[in-house]
Image: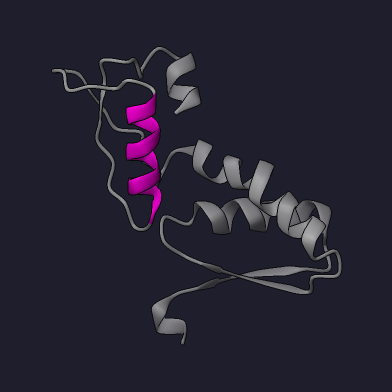
């Protein structure tokens, strides 16, 4: 959302349109409401599936947090929805913790 706001694509009068494969839909709705987004004829689709901000957020926040909590982590299994968490963590651990491998976890992997 912050990148879209900086670029002027998302304003307080924008209507967000976003598919959700998890709890992002709820979080995005709450965040949008807190920023005053209201119905209008302009629709903004942030598209978590191809938006690089998705994996970058997990690279900057989620992965470093996991690394601090588990400094000797060997394997990280990540649920795969829109794959932002997986891609951000995989890139982070590949660059900063080469001894750790990242693997997607899906319902079919059970």
Between 99 and 73, the one lying in front of the other is 73
Q: Where residue 92 sits in the image (x, y, percent)?
A: 72, 51
Give the farthest residue toward the bottom.
110
Q: Where residue 19 sits in the image (x, y, percent)?
A: 27, 47
Q: Is 29 placed left or right of 40 in the picture?
A: right
Give the farthest residue toward the front.
34
Q: How many marks?
A: 0
Q: Is 74 placed left or right of 22 in the picture?
A: right
Residue located 17% across and 23% down the image: 39
Q: Is 52 placed left or right of 21 in the picture?
A: right
**Residue 7 to residue 102: above or below:** above
**Residue 54 to residue 71: above or below:** above
Residue located 44% across and 38% down the image: 51
Residue located 34% across and 47% down the image: 26
| Image quadrant in which the N terminus is located | top left
State whether the magenta stretch is mostly helix, strand or loop.
Answer: helix
* Residue 24 magenta-highlighted: yes
Way the structure is coloured: one colour
Q: Is 8 placed left or right of 66 in the picture?
A: left
- Residue range corresponding to the magenta coloring: 23-34
Between 46 and 38, the one lying in front of the other is 38
Residue located 51% across and 51% down the image: 84
Q: Where residue 37 sits in the image (x, y, percent)?
A: 29, 22
């Amino acid at each position: 959302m912050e990148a879209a706001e900086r670029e002027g694509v998302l304003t307080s009068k924008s209507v967000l349109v976003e598919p959700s494969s998890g709890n992002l839909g709820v979080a995005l709705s709450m965040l949008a409401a807190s920023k005053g987004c209201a119905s209008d004829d302009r629709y903004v689709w942030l598209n978590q599936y191809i938006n690089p901000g998705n994996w970058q957020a997990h690279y900057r926040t989620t992965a470093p947090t996991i690394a601090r909590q588990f400094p000797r982590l060997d394997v990280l299994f990540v649920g795969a929805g829109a794959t932002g968490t997986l891609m951000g963590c995989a890139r982070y651990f590949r660059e900063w913790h080469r001894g750790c491998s990242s693997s997607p976890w899906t319902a079919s992997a059970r």
